[in-house]
């Protein structure tokens, strides 16, 4: 499968607990941190929850 790069571009301060937990599950801890994940439906669903905090490259 293809991989995607996910970069955190906004702070999680003031976000609901579920969005903070989603960022942690993706492996994002700080602004400008980048992680690579497989392009699976579960990962894409997690990205959809925090789409206003991250940017995605294919």
Image: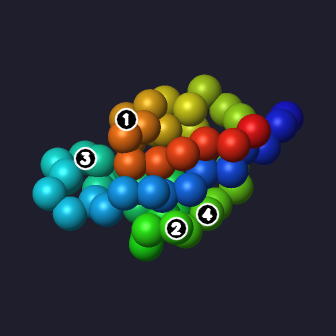
Q: Which residue is mark 4?
A: 34
SS for callout 4: strand
Number of dots carrying numbers: 4
Q: Which residue is mark 2?
A: 32
Please give the name of the residue rendered at 14% of the width and 57% of the height, measured from the top-left corner: 14
Q: Is label 4 or label 2 in front?
A: 2
Q: Label 3, label 1: how many angstroms apart (C-alpha)?
A: 9 Å
> In the image, residue 39 lies at what x, y percent?
71, 35
Q: Are marks 3 and 2 in contact (CB under 8 Å)?
A: no
Q: Which residue is mark 3?
A: 18
Q: Earlier in the sequence, mark 4 or mark 1?
A: 4
Q: Are marks 4 and 2 in contact (CB under 8 Å)?
A: yes
Q: Earlier in the sequence, mark 2 or mark 1?
A: 2
Q: Earlier in the sequence, mark 3 or mark 2?
A: 3
Q: Is label 3 or label 4 in front?
A: 4
Callout 1 crowding tier (Cα within 10 Å): few <14, some 14–19, many ≥20: some
51 with respect to 15 (left or right): right
> In the image, residue 22 lies at what x, y percent?
38, 50
Q: Are marks 3 and 1 in contact (CB under 8 Å)?
A: yes
Q: Is label 3 or label 2 in front?
A: 2
Q: Is label 3 or label 1 in front?
A: 1
Q: Label 2, label 1: how many angstroms apart (C-alpha)?
A: 18 Å
Callout 4 crowding tier (Cα within 10 Å): few <14, some 14–19, many ≥20: some
SS for callout 2: loop
Q: Is label 4 or label 1 in front?
A: 4
In which quadrant will I find the N terminus?
A: top right
Q: Earlier in the sequence, mark 3 or mark 1?
A: 3
Visible in this render: residue 38?
no
Please give the name of the residue rendered at 61% of the width and 63% of the height, measured from the top-left corner: 34
Q: Are marks 3 and 4 in contact (CB under 8 Å)?
A: no
Please give the name of the residue rendered at 55% of the width and 68% of the height, measured from the top-left corner: 33
Q: Which residue is mark 1?
A: 49
């Amino acid at each position: 499968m293809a991989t995607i790069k996910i970069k955190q571009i906004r702070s999680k301060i003031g976000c609901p607990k579920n969005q903070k937990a989603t960022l942690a599950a993706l492996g994002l801890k700080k602004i400008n941190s980048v992680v690579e994940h497989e392009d699976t439906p579960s990962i894409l669903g997690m990205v959809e929850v925090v789409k206003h905090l991250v940017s995605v490259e294919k």
